[in-house]
Image: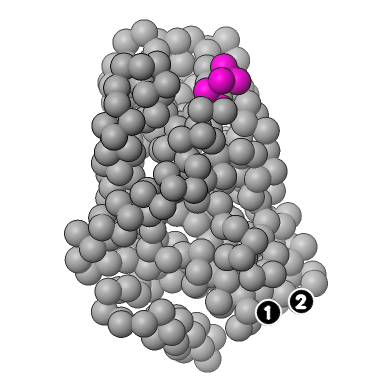
Amino acid sequence: MNKKPFVLAICGPTASGKTWLGVELAKKYNGEIVSADSIQIYKGLDIASAKPSADEMQGVPHHLIDFLDRNTAFSVADYVQIANKKITDVLNRKKLPIIVGGTGLYIDSLLDNVRFSDAKNDDDYRNSLYEFAQNYGNHALYLKLAELDPPAAEIIHENNLVRVVRALEVIHSTGRKFSELKAESRAVQSPYDSLIIGLCPRDRSALYDRINKRVDIMVQNGLVQEAKALWNENINSQMKTSANAIGFKELIPYFENTASLDDCIDKIKLETRHYAKRQLTWFRRNKRIVWITIDDFNRKSEILQNAQCIIENYRQ
């Protein structure tokens, strides 16, 4: 039996230190980063999506960041396909692929070798769903999914409009429940020997403080100006995925003179905290993740050392 190639993944909520740890481990183990972030794939939105800077990358190659136009639809199936190609490329160069990101659906689908249905895209039907959500709200559309496929509705957040729409589109085109097709898709064995390390706080309030400070830094670095430039392009109605980025949509009331800047920044902080909570809920369901509790350590070097011990013990 051929030995499966080893792939490492670093996951966790926003502002938990994934980027830093991924880079340090890449330097230690001759690795390259394959991003698993559903917003960092898009060009622009650099500050809003917290794309790593050149200084943060420290010369470590990063893949699947900043490569897609903002008005291009991109599904989890697309991600798995292109990420597998990148992983193969990294392995062929005798490097360690390190998946780093906070989009749990991407990481799970990639490492669990999820097979996606052959449901064809129906542009007219999909657009009608987006129009319905725009007219009646995300919750009203979510209730349609809850009626047709309750198990799918349990794992898809009502404000994740792209996934709600895709689930309804699959049901419409196949006549089967999205959740049933998803369960069947996991029957194929993964081609990878994967270890997933998760970063999480013991004290959630400490994470929320980190998030608030991070947003303040993003504002100082030009978040408002970045979002205003995108808003001025008047393409937000076309950006079905990237327009959902936290740090962009919350500033639109300020640009429209219906809310103060301070109120919009507070909204960004609130939505980011809510997002971190949803990320933790998602990742907690994955029993394969080996967790590092980041506030148990006084120095970053201790977190790195702990991660190295996890990797070495796993590979013995």
Q: Which residue is mark 2?
A: 94
Q: Residue at x 73, y 66 (%)?
A: 90
User: Residue 155: percent from the left, percent from the top?
Assistant: 33, 41
Q: Which residues are magenta?
A: 230-234
Q: Which residue is mark 1?
A: 30
Earlier in the chain: of badge 2 and badge 1, it is 1
User: Residue 61: percent from the left, percent from the top?
Assistant: 70, 65
Q: Nearer the viewer, mark 2 or mark 1?
A: 1
Work out which residue is located at the far bottom of the displayed protein and give it.
316
Residue 219 versus residue 87 in the image, above or below = above
Front residue of this view, candidates 203 and 79? 203
**Magenta-drawn stretch contains 232:** yes
Q: CA distance from mark 2 to mark 1?
A: 8 Å
Work out which residue is located at the far right of the displayed protein and give it.
93
Residue 147, can we see it?
A: no
Q: Amino acid at mark 1?
A: Asn
Residue 292 versus residue 285 in the image, above or below = below
**Magenta-drawn stretch contains 175:** no
User: Residue 28: percent from the left, percent from the top?
Assistant: 60, 83
Front residue of this view, candidates 262 and 286? 262
The quadrant in which residue 158 appears is top left
Secondary structure of residue under mark 1? loop
